[in-house]
Amino acid sequence: MSTMYYDILNSISQNKKLLAVLIDPDKMTLNNISAFIDTVNKSKVTHIFIGGSTVNKNSTEELVSEIKKHTKLPLILFPGDVTQITKKADALLFLSLISGRNPEYLIGKQVEAVSKLRETTLEVISTGYILIENGKETSVQKVTGTLPMSRNNIQDIINTAKAGELLGMKLIYLEAGSGASKAITSEIISSVKKELNIPLIVGGGIRSKEQLDLAFDSGADLVVIGTAFEEDESFFEELK
């Protein structure tokens, strides 16, 4: 039986670039879902990520249930906390914040999640999550109490990503943060990609098709866009 992860690997082997829209349950009302997802379905979006740094209890499950009514695109949880896990999604990015040194977000929250995951059939995809400075403080930084990695110390970012792979993680996610003022540079993306043998996800600060194309051209296998769609749904028109 095919899985989300192997579908990603298969797409990459065929040189297909993947695009995810990130939907924050606290920023999307159920009444707006139908129209929003209709626009998503007509675009080049291949995956829908659901999650946020802080989300009200039950909001995620309600949102996932509603989205499922309007699309066949895979729904993957991108949780900021254990409370955002719902069995109604298709898969879960099992994130470990390897750029930080807060044990709660390296392994603590993951241990806490296990009892909840036992009650689901979610496909769990281990993901090394690396937060990179973007010019302003992000929600992830505030919630986790960790500092982002310096965008100027590329070797340190490379080593951290490779360490995640060697630890057995299946994906590496380079994140500038929600609403980032600066996207991750092409130099960082290409340098990290050269060292990895696993898929590379890039997100944060991408607000134009030019930036999106640059991320892909630099080596990103999957790009995540959130704020750009929240602020300007016409961005979808460029991606048809």
Image (tube, helix red, strand yellow):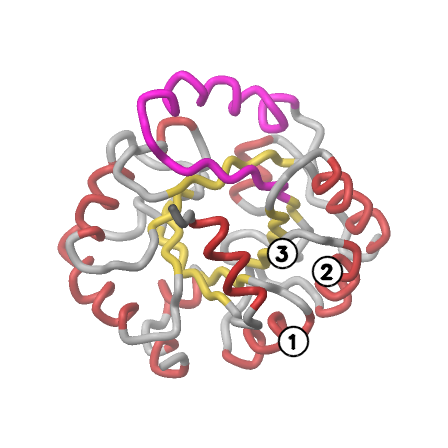
**In this picture, which residue range is highlighted in magenta?**
103-129
In this rendered view, identify the residue nearer to me: 83 or 134.
Answer: 83
Q: Is residue 224 left or right of residue 34?
A: right
Q: Residue at x 39, y 59 (%)?
A: 47
Could you tell me the amino acid type at mark 1? Asp
Image height check: is 173 above or below 124?
below
**Residue 91 locus on image (x, y percent):** 39, 42
Q: Earlier in the sequence, mark 1 or mark 2?
A: 2
| Disc 2 packing (10 Å; few <14; some 14–19; many ≥20) | many
Could you tell me the amino acid type at mark 2? Lys
Residue matched to label 1 = 217
Image height check: is 126 above or below 12?
above
**Residue 27 locus on image (x, y percent):** 31, 51
SS for callout 2: helix
Q: Earlier in the sequence, mark 3 or mark 2?
A: 2
Q: Residue at x 71, y 39 (%)?
A: 164
Q: Is residue 128 magenta?
A: yes
Q: Is residue 82 magenta?
A: no
| Disc 1 packing (10 Å; few <14; some 14–19; many ≥20) | some
Q: Earlier in the sequence, mark 3 or mark 1?
A: 3
**Mark 3 near mark 1, Cβ–Cβ under 8 Å?**
no
| Disc 3 packing (10 Å; few <14; some 14–19; many ≥20) | many
Residue matched to label 3 = 200
Numbered label attached to residue 193: 2
**Residue 43 locus on image (x, y percent):** 34, 75
Numbered label attached to residue 180: none
Q: Residue at x 58, y 56 (%)?
A: 201
**Mark 3 near mark 2, Cβ–Cβ under 8 Å?**
yes
The span from disc 1 to disc 2 (Cα, nearest Å) is: 11 Å
Q: Residue at x 17, y 51 (%)?
A: 30
